[in-house]
Image (cartoon, rainbow, N blue to C red):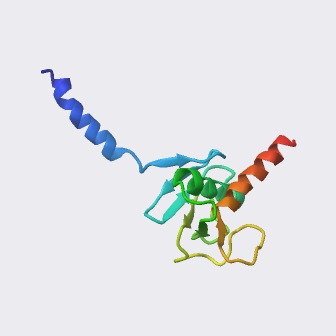
Amino acid sequence: MTILSRLFPVFIAVGLAASPAAAYEAQNGFTVRQLDKSRFEVLPRGGLSASDAWCAAGDFVIHGLRLARNTKIWRISEPPRPSGKSIVFSLSSDGATSNTGLASFGGGASVSANHGDTICDSMRMMRLDR
C-alpha cells in the first residue's frame, strides 16, 4: 500500500470539509445557497437587481427545492441591497421586510415562487427583443 493510497481518504475528507454548502445555479446564472431549513440567499455578482434575485429565488424554490409554485417567498434583506451583499429570502415570514424591492404590489415583502419564475420569463423575453 503506497503512501498516496493511505492519504487518499484524508484528502477526500479535507476536500469535503472545505467545500461550501451546496449551491444551486438559477436559470439566470445567479447562485442560490441554502442557509437553513427556511432561509436561502442569492449571492452577489455584478448586476444583481431585485428582479434578478426574485427570479433566482422563484427558480430555486420551484426547481431546486421542488416546492409548489404557489409557495410564498419573503424577502429578509432590507432593500436597497448594499453593493457586494447577498439578498436573503425565506419560506417563513419571520424577519421579513415590509418591501419586496420590486414595484409596489401592496402585499408586503412576499411573492409566490411562480411570480419569481415569471420574472425570469419576462427578463428573458426582454433580452430576446433587443
Residue at image coords 76%, 73%: 105
Q: Quadrant of residue 130?
A: top right
Quarter of the figure with the N terminus: top left
Q: Is residue 14 above or below residue 48?
A: above
Rendering coords of residue 77 (x, y %): 58, 69
Q: Nearer the viewer, residue 60 or 6?
A: 60
Q: Position of residue 4 (x, y in %)?
A: 20, 24
Q: Residue at x 54, y 53 (%)?
A: 32
Where residue 94 sits: x, y (%)?
Answer: 52, 77
Q: In the displayed image of the protein, which residue is found farthest to the top? A: 2
Where's residue 11, x and y in %?
26, 35
Outermost residue to the right: 129
Please state which of residues 24 and 5 is positioned toward the viewer in this rendering: 24
Name the residue at 42% across, 51% down.
21
Name which residue lies at 75% across and 78% down.
106
70 and 17: which is toward the camera: 70
Report the number of discs: 0
> In terms of image quadrants, where is residue 8?
top left
* Horizontal relation, residue 101 to residue 10: left or right: right
Q: Nearer the viewer, residue 48 or 65?
A: 65
Task: Note whether 115 is above or below 10 in the view shown.
Answer: below
